[in-house]
Image (cartoon, grey):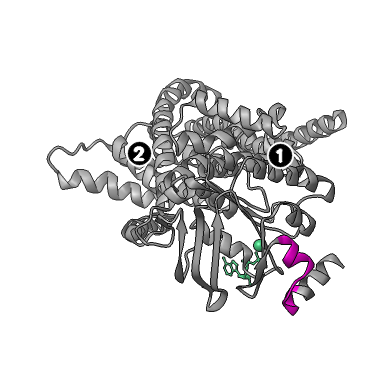
Amino acid sequence: METRLRVDDVWKSWDGVPVLRGIDLSVASHQVVALIGASGSGKSTLLRCVNGLVSVDAGSIWLDESLDVTHERTNLDDVRRRVGIVFQSFNLFPHMSVLDNVTLGPRKVLHRSRDLAREAALTLLDRFGLADKANGYPDQLSGGQQQRVAIVRALAMEPELMLFDEITSALDPMLVGEVLDSVAELKATGMTIVMATHEMSFAREVADRVCFLSAGQILEQGTAEQVLTDPQERLTRDFLARFLR
Amino acid sequence: MLIGLGSLAAFVLVVGIVVSQLPGWHVVQDTFFNIDEFVSSFPQLISAFWLNIRIFIVAEVFILIVGIVVALARTLQAPIWLPIRVVATIYTDVFRGVPTILVILLLGFGIPALDLQGVPNSEVLWGTVALVLSYGAYVAEVFRAGLASVHPSQRMASRSLGLSSWQTNRHILLPQAVRNVVPPLLNDFISLQKDTALVSILGPIEILRRAQIDTSMSFNYTPYVAAAVIFIALTIPMTRFADWLQARTQKQRRAAATV
Ligand SMILES: Nc1ncnc2c1ncn2[C@@H]1O[C@H](COP(=O)(O)OP(=O)(O)O)[C@@H](O)[C@H]1O
Ligand SMILES: [Mg+2]
């Protein structure tokens, strides 16, 4: 299987405080990898390094073994049109309709015609149960709907890799399910996914691999079964015990 | 509502009676509120005011352009843009610090005095340029505050889609910033509308100059009062409109905050 993403000994400090300390991670295409770990362990920073929102201090990050995100000559806009990201806080553009949110990238970055972009967007919105919201505005949607629009907005760029950063953490418990269903649906289409999450049972259901981050290092990784039910490290056990109560 | 109107009418009546009983009121009335003077100066004032309006409209368009460009220039982060950022910063600092009338004098008298080949020496032109430079600095700051009021996660989301920095400014940040700054911008334009009268110092016959000429011929100050009435007739509707917009924006924010 080809390697879609390879993170190679990545280090990052914020204001002199190390946040990522030698991260190695390899993700094959069609794989779903879950990042778990306490708040502040570096999950968001790692995901943001992958699409170049955050620059690394050392190490390299390869897309398809051919494009080095961390190389200073790499055009980050090229990276970002190949890597989709969805944030905890939706971050839809409030002054644009749902349809415009979704077609903006394809039109301005991929230079699709308005009609083509619109058609593709409507198909996607329909697939995620949002067809009737196309002309609505973000503030007219529930949190779950907004987050699904954010997923569709990222998908409309036809990325080869999707990053999800705790995308259900800001949602009412009632609305978590619909967003997780969307992720499961995405997995079914063969999308390669790296997701930071606190939804352990969901990780167990969809993740091919689970990585436990602690203080900027991947302390333990393996199949969801291994890491979540039979953790080898004491810190992993402590973390899971606190989480599953 | 009815009680309010009644009380207002009574108040005006009492003030009117008291004022008209004051000794010397007749002199005041004759000097400032002379009906004949008012009527005879009014048509010329109105046609002179047309010049103010033209200055105002042309200046406003260029002020908006200067304001947006300078505000965007000040957001440029990459090291290569440092010179542009420095120039933009110096511009806003200088022109916000110098009184508008001083800029008008400097450009309006200074540039024609240079007697440069091919450079027009119209006072109206240089007066307008001075207004643009002076107000452009204020409006740039208004836009800058507006851009800063858009949450940084919006830029992050836009850049994550692969939009360039310029596209992000153009499609994501500016439209949201503009919404936030419309009320303060309107206030700046209300003062601009009044400050078109400052151009009179250079000599063109705009409304204030016209009133001055009329006054000096008749030794009666009613033309000044008439000019004031004309200004007020334009600024009051603008002020009310700005207030209304501000109230509406606040209401929308409150509504958005409750969902
Ligand atoms: N932009 C930033 N500037 C400074 N410190 C940051 C920044 N982003 C994250 N950090 C710090 O890095 C550490 C890891 O944060 P983060 O990657 O968000 O962890 P997680 O997503 O696992 O909660 C935290 O201590 C956080 O305060
Ligand atoms: Mg995080």
Q: Is residue B54 left or right of residue A224?
A: left
**Which of B164 and B148 lies nearest the eye of the viewer?**
B164
Q: Residue tagged by mark 2?
A: B128
Mark 1: give few (<14), some (14-19) or many (20+) Cα within 10 Å.
Answer: some
**Which of A20 and B24 lies nearest the eye of the viewer?**
A20
Compared to residue A41, the image places residue A32 above or below, namely above
Q: Amino acid at mark 2?
A: Thr
Q: Is residue A235 magenta?
A: yes
Q: Is residue B231 magenta?
A: no
Where is residue A39, by image quadrant? Answer: bottom right
**Which of A192 and B22 lies nearest the eye of the viewer?**
A192
Question: Are the residues under marks 1 and 2 on the same chain?
Answer: no
Q: Residue tagged by mark 1?
A: A139
| Residue range corresponding to the magenta coloring | A224-236
- Of helix, strand and loop, which one carries label 1? helix
| Most frequent secondary structure within the magenta stretch | helix
